Image (cartoon, helix red, strand yellow):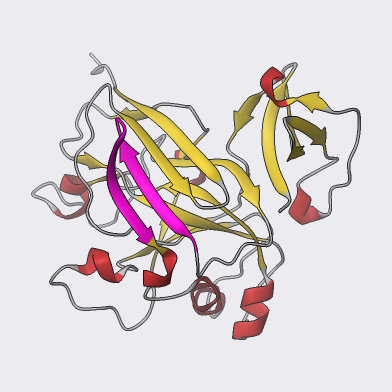
């Protein structure tokens, strides 16, 4: 399965194809048709970055049967936005803001869009999936639905570093049949097949495209399974999606501003 990453080497950020511990640099993003350019580079010699530079990040709430609890199943995909500024690289810290009271992990499968999509049929939506990667829809429950609830989820799910992504985008994988697992400090806290999704990835894309045009490189965080729990300073979160690898991020508490 082709694997694509974005990396920093000699102070230059580039896209590349990963194979057997080597990176083959690309002229531009693979979903934009970037061909190989330049000699291979050892994977050990680079720093991995979030593998996409999306124009828009979409996310889906309440999309696993195992996550619903006593809540009714939504009739249609429940879509919200995460700001691009929330992206965090593999290995980069999830920073808990000083005012945040109840920050949780949400391990997720993330779909990467490969072509412009508008008013798509289900088949067109399926063809628009370039590949899959791992994501973490970090969320502060107090700002989301607690006593400090905001009108929108702009900071609950959009604070800086609240969208870890990576380590690689892998093509030719079936998004309907992946094992998704999340560990905190080595303890398995989520383990679910993506067949438990209420709305499959093509359905989500078709639904979004009725009103909002998706463009190459856009991301869809597809929902989290089971239960989540609070993160604290010193934790390490690992999100693993079958066929992709492990997205690992430490957790740190930000120093309060004076």
Q: Does the magenta run of residues contain 191?
A: yes
Q: In this orientation, which residue lies closer to the viewer: 154 or 3?
A: 3
Q: Quadrant of residue 104?
A: top left
Query: On the picture, is 19 further left or further right than 185?
Result: right
Query: On the picture, is 172 further left or further right than 106?
Result: right
Residue 107: x and y, percent? 37, 49
Residue lying at the far top of the rendered structure: 258
Residue 136: x and y, percent? 40, 45
Q: Can the viewer see residue 207?
A: yes
Residue 99: x and y, percent? 19, 31
- Residue at 41% of width from left, 26% of height from top? 93
Q: Give the quarter of the figure containing the C terminus.
A: top left
- Residue at 72% of width from left, 18% of height from top? 11
- Residue at 31% of width from left, 33% of height from top? 186
Q: In this orientation, which residue lies closer to the viewer: 178 or 59?
A: 178
Q: Quadrant of residue 237?
A: top left
Q: Can the viewer see residue 137?
A: no
Q: Which residues are magenta?
A: 178-192
């Amino acid at each position: 399965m082709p694997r694509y990453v974005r990396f920093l080497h000699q102070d230059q950020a580039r896209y590349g194809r990963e194979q057997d511990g080597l990176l083959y640099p690309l002229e531009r993003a693979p979903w934009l048709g970037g061909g190989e350019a330049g000699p291979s580079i050892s994977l050990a010699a680079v720093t991995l970055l979030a593998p996409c530079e999306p124009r828009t990040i979409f996310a889906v709430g309440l999309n696993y049967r195992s996550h619903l609890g006593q809540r009714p199943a939504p009739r249609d995909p429940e879509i919200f936005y995460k700001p691009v500024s929330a992206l965090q690289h593999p290995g980069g810290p999830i920073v808990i803001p000083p005012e945040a009271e109840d920050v949780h992990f949400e391990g997720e499968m993330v779909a990467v869009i490969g072509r412009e999509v508008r008013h798509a049929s289900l088949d067109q939506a399926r063809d628009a999936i370039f590949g899959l990667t791992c994501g973490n829809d970090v969320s502060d429950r107090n700002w989301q639905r607690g006593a400090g609830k905001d009108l929108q989820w702009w900071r609950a799910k959009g604070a800086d570093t609240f969208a870890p992504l990576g380590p690689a985008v892998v093509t030719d994988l079936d998004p309907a049949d992946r094992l998704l697992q999340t560990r905190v400090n080595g303890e398995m806290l989520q383990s679910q097949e993506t067949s438990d999704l209420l709305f499959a990835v093509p359905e989500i894309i078709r639904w979004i495209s009725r009103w909002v045009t998706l463009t190459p490189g856009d991301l869809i965080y597809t929902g989290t399974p089971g239960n989540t729990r609070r993160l604290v300073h010193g934790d390490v979160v690992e999100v693993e999606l079958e066929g992709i690898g492990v997205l690992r991020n430490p957790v740190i508490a930000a120093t309060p501003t004076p």
